[in-house]
Image (spheres, rainbow, N blue to C red):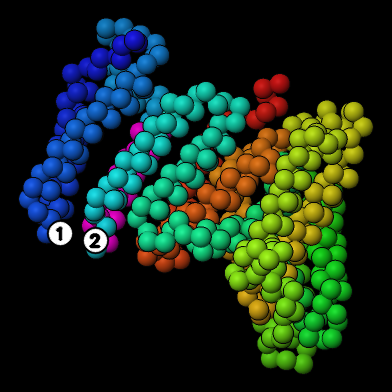
Amino acid sequence: MEKLPQLTLPARILGLAIAIVLTAIGFGFGLAQGLSVQVVILAAIATMALFIWAWRFVIGQFLDGLPPTEADGPSPLRTAWVQYRWPLAGLALILLAFLLLSLTVEGFFNIWNVISLIILLAILILTRTLGRQFQQNRSAFIGIMVLAGLFSVGSMNIEGFASGNNIKSMLLFASFLGLASIGQTLVALLGGLDLSIPFIIGAANVGLLYLISLGVPPWLASIIVLVIGALFGIVNGFLSYRLQGQALIVTLGTGFAISGGVQIVTSIGTAYSGNVFGTVPPWLSNLAAMNGSTFGLPFPPVIAIWAIIALVLILALRLTVYGRFLYALGVNRTSASRVMISEMRYWVTAYALSGFFAALTGGLLLGWSGGGFIGVGDQYLFLTLAAIVVGGTSLLGGAGGYGFTVIGVLVLQVLSSFLVGIGLDFKWQQFIFGLLILPMVALYARSPHIRTQI
């Protein structure tokens, strides 16, 4: 059996000091909440024992494999901190967040939340240790671990979190985000971004109901909206290709243009430009409503639609010529052009698909809400970017894929449901999402681009 590295005396003293502080904090919280003295003492003993064990295990993993240091050089503890400061900072942030929530949210400090904290710390340790064995798909492994941890913690702490209705609700909203993120993933694989997605979603949402209210058959109105969305994507792709490096400004400008144009058209003869009222066709409501059914099964068809499209897209990116060429362009545009790959065609196609699926998302959201609202897509500006970043698709192009985005979508949706379940409002959700995105962007931005590895 391999022997764990022995900790230095300063490391042992530091670990013992932190264990005592955490135990004292837990002891105080337990007494303040009126728990029995016996329960508080047992919890305090368990907390100290678990932390001392975890401290030795974590530090032992960090010290394992470090190069030996000279007697007059830096201590092993300092060397471990320099090399592994980000995982340690993650541990500190989790503990700090738990402390703040315990101080500010009444009843937050309880046995189930302590177990949840232990699960989250265990996930962090596992992703640090086992993640070495999954270098090729490390981001997917981390995402799956985080997803499993969040669902476990939510199931233990929130009543009904693992119920069939809540799972159906999470999958429904994940389907909207997943469809909206298809285009963002494709353009990111090329090294671009599409900021027009939320505007096309809102414009399609309002425009579809407006056309239906004018007497256009719903099926024809849906086709018109999808075609217009794809046309705007083609414009985005062509301009972004011609104005290299200006994709953010180009897509933002076209997004504002389509949003403003739809509001101008729909405001003719009415005082409401950002809202359109009318009757949504029953078949459209069935597609996206919580009480919708799929061939008699009690779940909305949009979930099945997303699953089928996701499967087809994942296979297409990996097994078809289009997928291989898309990755090739993201890796090295110059080399790809020298083997006669039409960069403009792939660039325009990716943005056209982005516009198409954004318009599809806007139409499906109309079926869910029953009314047209121009701002319905606003949240997707942030969430589509968050989904691909959390999933691990590189914003520099050439690495990742839609399978990674699916993992990111599910992580964000489960996290959102968990935050709602513990009583946090929207601004706190945005704050925590931001804290999640920053380290993920920093992590992937620090990784060398794939073109430097081949």
Give percent across and percent down for residue 215: 84, 86
Q: Type of residue at label 2?
A: Gly
Q: Residue furthest top?
A: 70
Q: Which is nearer the eye, 59 or 78? A: 59
Q: Which residues are magenta?
A: 86-105
Callout 2 crowding tier (Cα within 10 Å): few <14, some 14–19, many ≥20:
few
In screen coordinates, is 101 left or right of 322? left
Q: Is residue 32 left or right of residue 215?
A: left
Regarding mark 1 in the picture, which secondary structure is present there? loop
Residue 328, by quadrant, is top right
The residue beneath circle 2 is 107
Q: 7 above or below 178?
A: above
Q: Nearer the viewer, residue 83 or 291?
A: 291
Residue 310 spot, x, y in % from top left: 71, 48
132 versus 231 height, above or below: above
Q: Is residue 104 visible?
A: no
In the image, taking residue 157 as reference, residue 13 lies left or right, namely left
Q: Residues within 10 Å of mark 1 (few under 14, many from 20)?
A: few
Residue for point 25% across, 14% down? 6
Label 2 near label 1: C-beta < 8 Å?
yes
Residue 74 is situated, as x and y percent measured from the top left of the image, at 30, 16
Q: For residue 83: magenta?
A: no
Q: Position of residue 377 (x, y in %)?
A: 64, 67
Above or below residue 260? Residue 105 is above
Residue at image coords 18%, 38%: 46
**In the drawing, what numbered circle is on residue 33?**
1
Q: Quadrant of residue 300?
A: bottom right
